[in-house]
Image (spheres, rainbow, N blue to C red):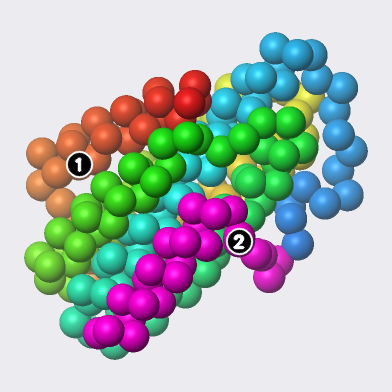
Amino acid sequence: MLDDLILSFDRALRTLSGVSASGRANPASGIAEADLSPEERRHAAGLMRVNHTGEVCAQALYQAQALTARDRGIRQRLASAAHEEEEHLAWTQQRLAELESRPSLLNPLWYAGSFAIGLAAGLTGDRANLGFVAETESQVEEHLSGHMDRLPPGDARSRAIVATMRDDEIRHGSAAREAGGAGLPWIARAAMRGVARLMTLTAYRL
């Protein structure tokens, strides 16, 4: 447990300091940069900042849920998903730099809050833990689909990143349900949507 806590602390530092890496090529590689207007660039940066913050939250959630999972196989599933989420983190951070923008200033708070939520989810048992993953990924898929509609039409680089992220989230959610994830009560789903909405509104601007 002590080793796991040390590793979790190390991952938190790397996540918040911007030291993230991807084993896969960035989906935007080979796609030319669009000639965006200042307003389109600002809007795209705001949306990609929201996506980056979502990946910061995902790192915290998966780390906390892995710490509290009883089953070794489930811990490995969560660790594998966290690795892909770290790739998303690297891609969105790179895109923010290309758009001459920055990550959200509130990321440390969102990481801490998400870690606490992940611990609470994990402590309810493995089926509920997996159910939380499935519901989270379902809501993230919906959120990313909305961003595909809202991104500037010419911003093919951002669109390629978001599309690949969405495909990964769909796969993570399906895997959690197939592994025995239990459905969450409506009040839990509604609370998750409320927190996500607050994160979206703040990260877009801050």
Residue 102 is left or right of residue 199, and the answer is right
Viewer-proximal residue, 186 or 90?
A: 90
Identify the magenta region. 1-24
- Comparing marks 2 and 1, which lies closer to the viewer? 2
Q: Which mark is residue 20?
A: 2
What secondary structure is found at the residue carrying circle 1? helix
Image point 36% across, 33% down: which residue? Answer: 199
Q: Is residue 73 something that shows in the picture?
A: no
How far apart are the two marked residues, 2 and 1, measured between alpha carbons? 30 Å
Q: Which mark is residue 69?
A: none
Q: Where's residue 99, x and y in %?
A: 73, 31
Q: Where's residue 130, x and y in %?
A: 26, 65
Q: Main secondary structure of the magenta part?
A: helix
Residue 37 in magenta stretch = no
46, above or below 119, in the image: above
Q: Which residue is disc 1 drawn over? A: 189
Viewer-proximal residue, 196 or 93?
A: 93
What secondary structure is found at the residue carrying circle 2? loop
Image point 35% across, 43% down: which residue? Answer: 110
Q: Where's residue 59, x and y in %?
A: 42, 59
Image point 28% across, 65% down: which residue? Answer: 64
